[in-house]
Image: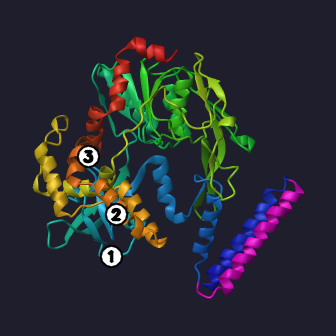
Amino acid sequence: MMRNTRKLFLLITGVIILAWGALSLKSDDQNFEISKQLNIYASLFREANLFYVDEVNPGDLVTTSIKAMLKSLDPYTVFYPEADMEDVKLMTTGEYAGIGAVISKKGDNVIIREPYKGFPADKAGLLPGDIILAIDGNSIKGKSTDDVSEMLKGQPGKEITVRIQREGENNSIDKKAVREKIQLPSVPYYGMMSNNVGYIYLNSFTDKAASDVRKAALSLKNQGATSLILDLRGNSGGLLDQAVEICNFFIPKDTKVVDTRGKVKQWDKEYKTTQNPILPDMPLVVLIDRSSASASEIVSGTLQDYDRAVLIGERSFGKGLVQTIRDLPYNTKMKVTTAKYYIPSGRCIQALDYTHRNSDGSVGKVPDSLITEYTTKSGRKVYDGGGITPDIKIEPEELARITQELILQDLCFDFVNSYALKNPQIAEIKDFNITDELYNQFKTWLKEKDFTYENESQRLLNNLEKTAKEEKYYEQVKSQLDALKKDFAHSIDRDMDLFKNQISSFLAEQFIQRYYYAEGVMAYKVLHDKEVAKAIEILSNQDEFMNLLK
């Protein structure tokens, strides 16, 4: 331990010396301040390591301090130790080596949440809801999902044994899976809608995003698509060059897509399209929501600025910051915010101002007084300071309290898994719906599980009652409180009937995911999606489409 500590201390000291040399071109005052602070840090680390009452792990101590330091800058500047290199690879390429399944925590257990169709977990017969007990004989009791994920990943071609507990089985079951290279598709679904409208769902901007979109777009065109929907909802972004290339499918060669501007001049760069577009004139609708961020906002904002697409949905997230991955010693890396990006109208769409924090450390949005008006190519008004505003706003349906609780308590997931163990098939995606019989089965199942929840009115009344007791007013207002409780008392049966359509919609998606996997969910959603329906309506009326772009 002492030898490792000494090595780490020498490394930190070396970093200080290197930092001093690298910063020699800056002012003497800044050089002195940086050297001073690094010196303090190295001395503090040494003293804490030598004299703290319990043994400490030097690597963990330094990693913790690094992460806390970078977190104070913004949420996107992140340190990746050597053990997390697979995460970096997954982030940039969508590729990793493992069994191909989403896992999650459920109570004290880690479960299989979703096996990917055709990948090792699926081929091994692992099912949603299976509780993972051990991997290659090593118990996972008390481990986090990150720990279990690391145990499932590893060398491709190697067989692993996953011990699970399945509902309805008295004994545990061993499932053998052979690890493979898992390539998560950036376009998990595309297909033809009504009225010759093509649809592409892009869920991430990995290094294959542009080629996947190109393949999907050309396939749809060959199938007879005369207009296109590009769905960027839930897409948190990724690689900038992929966003530029995707814009190039729709706008001319040598057209500016985005500028990046940073403190260091090497990050000031203008990105232009480099090829002739493959779909220069095809009418286009882009769908965005509050989770569409970064590269998604570059694509949607650029196409809006050139009046090339109609945007439908919610205001986007507002992440106008560019990150660059930098190599560090000992096979570690840092993703660091190096610039802000500006789309063709001149807008920077960053919503939060991390430079000027509030006194409590919180971050505020760009104030209205600093928001600037810009114009698109045809003169339409657009604004900076907070994401991309769609041309047609469609606000999401607010979930009823009972629906929220069913989701939070994971009861739809549990019911569907229980149902699927006894029923190997359901109707095809286009024909599936939650029948009255199936919905009543769900209601009965919830009663057997003693499902209960507290609505917001009841929560407030209970808090009021507690406060009244603390302040000695309870006896005076007891009768009024009891009357209010009676008035606001909810009935699960009543609420299940009142919000049947909303609950059925979520339950149906759970059924489709269980039987038809992730791509099935997308195929089902586009048949029942109000934003997609609006997009088809707009694309089916060329006069309305063109008027929205004027």
Q: Nearer the viewer, residue 291 or 58?
A: 291
Q: Nearer the viewer, residue 25 or 410?
A: 410
Tag in front: 1 or 2: 2
Q: CA distance from mark 1 to mark 2?
A: 58 Å
Tag in front: 3 or 2: 2
Q: Is residue 259 visible?
A: yes
Secondary structure at badge 2 equals helix
Q: Could you tell whether 260 is left or right of 513 in the image?
A: right
Of the numbered discs 1 and 2, the one sitting upstream in the chain is 1
Going by the numbered disc 3, the residue's amino acid type is Ile
Q: CA distance from mark 3 to mark 1?
A: 39 Å
Q: Nearer the viewer, residue 122 or 298?
A: 298
Q: Is residue 514 visible?
A: no
Region rendered in magenta = 27-55
Secondary structure at badge 1 equals strand
Going by the numbered disc 2, the residue's amino acid type is Ser
Which label is found at residue 503? 3
Query: Looking at the picture, does residue 193 appear above or below residue 367?
Result: above
Q: Could you tell whether 160 is left or right of 246 in the image?
A: left
Secondary structure at badge 3 equals helix
Query: Looking at the picture, does residue 476 appear above or below residue 384?
Result: below
Residue positioned 69% across, 41% down in the render:
267
Going by the numbered disc 1, the residue's amino acid type is Asn
Which label is found at residue 207? none
Which label is found at residue 479? 2
